[in-house]
Image (spheres, rainbow, N blue to C red):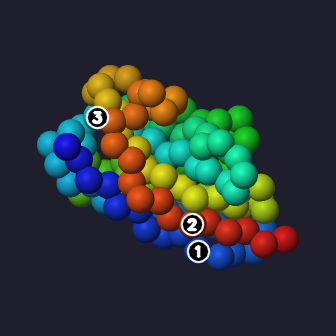
Amino acid sequence: QVQLVESGGGLVQAGASLRLSCAASGRTFSNSMGWFRQAPGKEREFVAAISWSGGSTYYADSVKGRFTISRDNAKNTLYLQMISLKPDDTAVYYCVISRVKTVIPRYPSTVGSWGQGTQVTVSS
């Protein structure tokens, strides 16, 4: 089992930037990883994912061009760089790791572990 701990959330104004980090412990950090988010009253949604090697990345259309996912396998850390934030980006952001190494975690059914979440609030 892997443990995931997110950090870096906060309250920012529209147009600002934030970088989320996710520190992982356990033997399965080499699996594909990603980020989901959940806004109040809405379902949890996919944001971004990265392959186990870091060579392939995937984004939701709503964040493409503004968010960048990356990973440092030497530090067991996943990142999400967010720029040009919008009020619609307000949500709790969750770090995830895939259930199977090569499967990209784009759906909750493909997620093996979830972090506890970090709140991102973007004011207009």
- Give the farthest residue toward the right: 124
Q: Which residue is mark 1?
A: 10
Q: Secondary structure at mark 2?
A: strand
Q: Nearer the viewer, residue 120 or 114?
A: 114
Q: CA distance from mark 2 to mark 1?
A: 6 Å
Q: Position of residue 97 (x, y in %)?
A: 35, 40
Mark 2–mark 1 CB contact (< 8 Å): yes
Q: Which residue is mark 3?
A: 31
Residue 79 visible in image: yes
Q: CA distance from mark 3 to mark 1?
A: 28 Å
Name which of mark 3 and mark 2 comes first in the sequence. 3
Q: Position of residue 27 (x, y in %)?
A: 15, 43
Q: Nearer the viewer, mark 3 or mark 2?
A: 2
Q: Is residue 28 left or right of residue 119?
A: left
Name which of mark 3 and mark 1 comes first in the sequence. 1
Q: Nearer the viewer, residue 21 or 54?
A: 21
Residue at 23% of width from left, 47% of height from top?
A: 2
Residue 44, quarter of the rendered image:
top right
Mark 3–mark 2 CB contact (< 8 Å): no
Residue at 43% of width from left, 50% of height from top?
A: 95
Name which of mark 2 and mark 1 comes first in the sequence. 1
Q: Amino acid at mark 3?
A: Asn
Q: Nearer the viewer, residue 52 or 34?
A: 34
| Quadrant of the rendering where the C terminus is positioned | bottom right
Q: Which residue is mark 2?
A: 119
| Quadrant of the rendering where the N terminus is positioned | top left
